[in-house]
Image (cartoon, rainbow, N blue to C red):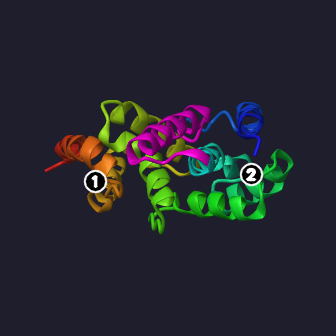
Amino acid sequence: MQFTEAKSFILNKLKKELPKYLSYHSIAHIKDVYQAADMLAKEEGIKGEDRKLLLTAALFHDSGFLVQQKDHERISCEIAAEHLPRFGYTAEQIKKISGMIMATKIPQKPHTQLEQIIADADLDYLGRDDFFKIGDNLFAEINMYSYMDENQWNQLQVDFMSKHHYFTPTAIKLRKEKKEKNLDLVKSKLPA
C-alpha cells in the first residue's frame, strides 16, 4: 500500500479539479477531516494498516464532488475503487475504505470503529471554535444550489445539530460540550 503516493495523487486531483464554488466541500475541508481523523485515530489507539485505511478514506470521502453533489459518497467510493489499486490497495482494503466513506453519508450510520471515527471527523467542526466560520462556508455553498435565507439556515442547523451525536469516546469528550454551546448560540439567532 503506497499511502503517501495515493495521498499526493488525490490531493493534487482535488486541488486542480474541484469546482471553485465549493466553499465548504473544498480542499480545506478534506484536509480538516484528515487531521481530525488522524487525531481521533491516535486517541482511539488505531495504528498501522487500519490508520492508513482510515486516512485514505478521509482523503477520498468527498472526491465524488468532482462529478456531482447528489450521491457524492457513492461516487467517491467509485473514484477510490478506480484509482487505489494502482497504489497497491487490495480489493478488501478498498471495501473497508468504501464502508468508511459511506459512513459519512447523512444520516450517519457507522458500523465499525473506523467508520465511527470518520463520521466524527467529518463533523468535527460542529464542536469547535471555528464552527461559525466553517458554517458560513456551508451556507454559501448551499446557496449555490438553492436559495435559503439566514433564518432558514439557522433552523436547518438547529434541526441537524439537535439530531447529531458523536460516536467515539474521544469526540464525545472533546467536542460534545462545545457543540451544545454552538447549538445554543444558533438557537439564540432564531426569531422568537
* 46 up-or-down from 3: above or below: below
**Which of these two is toward me, 70 or 181?**
181
Magenta residue span: 24-48
Quadrant assignment, res 175: top left
- Give the residue at x 26% y 58%: 162
Which kind of residue does numbered mark 2 sit on?
A: Val
Relative vertical location of residue 108 with respect to residue 133 in this rendering, above or below? below
Helix, strand or loop for the magenta stretch, by majority: helix
Residue 148 placement, left or right of 164? right
Question: Is 28 colored magenta in this rendering?
Answer: yes
For label 1, the SS is helix
Residue lying at 52% horizontally and 62% vertically, measured from the top left: 103
146 up-or-down from 108: above or below: above
Q: Quadrant of residue 127?
A: top left
Q: Amino acid at mark 1?
A: Val
Residue 158's disc number:
1
Look at mark 2 in the image and give the residue it sits on: 67
SS under mark 2: loop
Instruction: Give the mark nearer the N terminus: 1 vs 2.
Output: 2
The 10 Å Cα crowd at callout 1, few under 14, some 14 to 19, many 20 or more, is some
Across and down, in percent, residue 109 comes to 45, 68
Mark 1–mark 2 distance (CA, rounded to whole Å): 29 Å
Q: At x 69% / y 52%, what residue is drawn?
A: 64
